[in-house]
Image: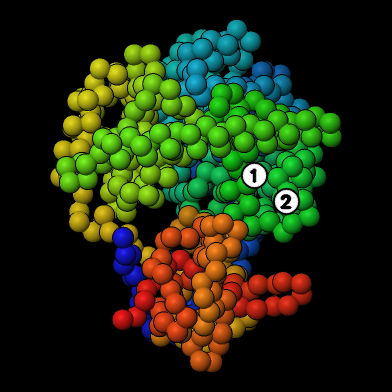
Amino acid sequence: MEKIWNIRRSNSRLRKEISRALRVSEILAQILINRGVSGVKEAESFLSCSLTGLHSPFLLKGMKKAVARIKKAISSDEKIMVWGDYDIDGVTSVALLISVLGEMGARALHYLPNRLEEGYGLNEKGAKEAKAKGVGLLITVDCGISADKEITYLKSSGIDTIVCDHHQPKEGSLPKAAWAIINPLQKDCSYPYKYMAGVGLAAKLACALMDNQKAVLDNHLDIIALGTVGDVVPLTGENRVFVKHGLSSLSQTRKLGLVALMEVSGLDNRTLNARHIGFILGPRINASGRLGSPEDSLRLLLARTELEARTLAQKLNQGNRLRQRIESRTLQEAIEQVESQINFKEHSIIVLGAPHWHRGVIGIVASRLVERYMRPTIMMSLEDEFGRGSGRSIGNFHLLEALRKCKDLLEEYGGHRRACGLKLKKTRFSDFFRTINRVTKEMLLPEDLVPALEIDAEILLSSLSENLINELNSLSPFGADNPEPLICSSGLKVKSKVSIVAGNHIKFWVTDGKLTCEAIGYNKKGNFPELEAGETVSLAYAPSVNNWQGNFSIQLKLEDVKISR
């Protein structure tokens, strides 16, 4: 399906003002405006990305009360349990807080639920274990904001609970029995930045506890960056600061587990960027939690010996290979189901289920189906008497709102606009399939089904230079809400025959008569119309500087191609 190119148009007055004040190109100024910058000071702050710009953790509602209770627990030698989640955000949050509590002399232990046996968040089994172990204070990280029942049970058992969670509270309700709640999204919390990952909030709590932000960040920015990128939160504001500086910290980390993981991943001695976390390190840390228990990932982050670190890194690497095999097999089966069971004239959403699909990979597979078919997708593992599923959305379609309209058929559900989780009785699967399709048909707009590219600027190809590309790279790290700048240029002549590289990449040369560049489409074989030398095209691309054996050249990383007729 041909994509629509939405070329952004910025305020020319503000663009010129930022360009002059900061002595940057108007192209960079326009992209800053595209990222939501509304003035010179904000643009300067975005580009400087300084650690000194981080807000005081005590601006978070509940922080003073939480810190006082934790310090009391440490001084009275109470056992403190840190309860996390099984994904990379939860694991890094636990690793960070356990480390800091240990440095402060606390008696700290942890609890990470098994994804397949216990599911997400606080549960009765773990709460009873906390009671049996004599825990006096329990701190949740990356979970807990919806656990009213479990926190009430903990309080009745003599255990105080501090909730440190970044997720949206359900319809304004908060766990009433909690000792303190740290969540920038709760009502009356005036904290200036609302979108931190769980590990970012855990870092804020750690900084407040130690009353020494520099010490916490010097020691732990590497895992803060790891969890922040891995949780796919917006790389804006404080998240951008954490990741920008955390990537440098990660490249030079002294944590034995991270050193070993980078070695087995082929990233040792590399300058790291956010993609290395998102596509290489993150999946390996997530693998153990996806397939069962995340304990190995936590042990890796806390490893004290090189032998332990190497052993665990190898184990996680092997686990990631297993996850990839399971994912690949599930994707193929899902595609076969779509082709045989889904009629896009009647069905507005893809809903699939099978009894043997692994719950740890169905969310990833749902994402792959969204990319392939441009439809919201829900994948369900239909085990025992229940089906448990994950969903991914498209465009502006609000997936959680669609689930709310089907709530009478569901045992549990949660999530947000772009992703969801749900549980239902297997006997209700067919009813749910029909109902969610009816709801989706009513909610989907025609434009939601048309793939679109958001283009930051249209320029002459000959405007590209090494200096401009380096300037654009100053906007990194790239990720959610701060994507790599996407440029388009028109009236280009194809100078060479298209060649296939490494099986699935395409490569050819283009020129505007003044500048000739290599264009490469990674994993784009079959995505574009066939091109012949001499044809005129428009390209959407991310410009980069290619360094091959010391020779520098401009290279265009292709996103889309349109042939001029």
What element does badge 2 sit on? loop
Q: Quadrant of residue 145?
A: top left
Relative placement, left or right, of 469 versus 564 is: right
User: Residue at 49% of width from left, 19% of height from top?
Assistant: 118
Looking at the rendered structure, the kind of residue marked 1 is Leu
Q: Residue furthest bottom?
A: 514
Q: Position of residue 115 (x, y in %)?
A: 51, 24
Toward the right, the furthest residue is 306
Q: Measured along the vertical axis of the image, is residue 88 above or below residue 389?
A: below
Residue at 52% across, 43% down: 231
Residue 360 percent across, percent down from the top left: 49, 30
What residue is at 77 percent from the left and 30 percent from the top?
311
Residue beneath label 1, please?
Answer: 281
Q: Nearer the viewer, residue 516 or 416?
A: 516
SS under mark 1: helix
Mark 2 and mark 1 residues within 8 Å of each other at the beta carbon: yes
Provide the residue designation for mark 2. Answer: 267
What whole-number distance in Å separates the C-alpha atoms at marks 2 and 1?
9 Å
Task: Look at the image and tell me whether residue 439 can be seen.
Answer: no
User: For the residue carrying disc 1, how many other residues have a C-alpha within 10 Å: few (<14), some (14-19), or many (20+)?
Assistant: many
Residue 371 or 425: which is nearer the viewer?
371
The image quadrant where one finds the C terminus is: bottom left
- Residue 11, how many percent across, how many down? 36, 79
Left or right: 562 as drawn, with respect to 131? left
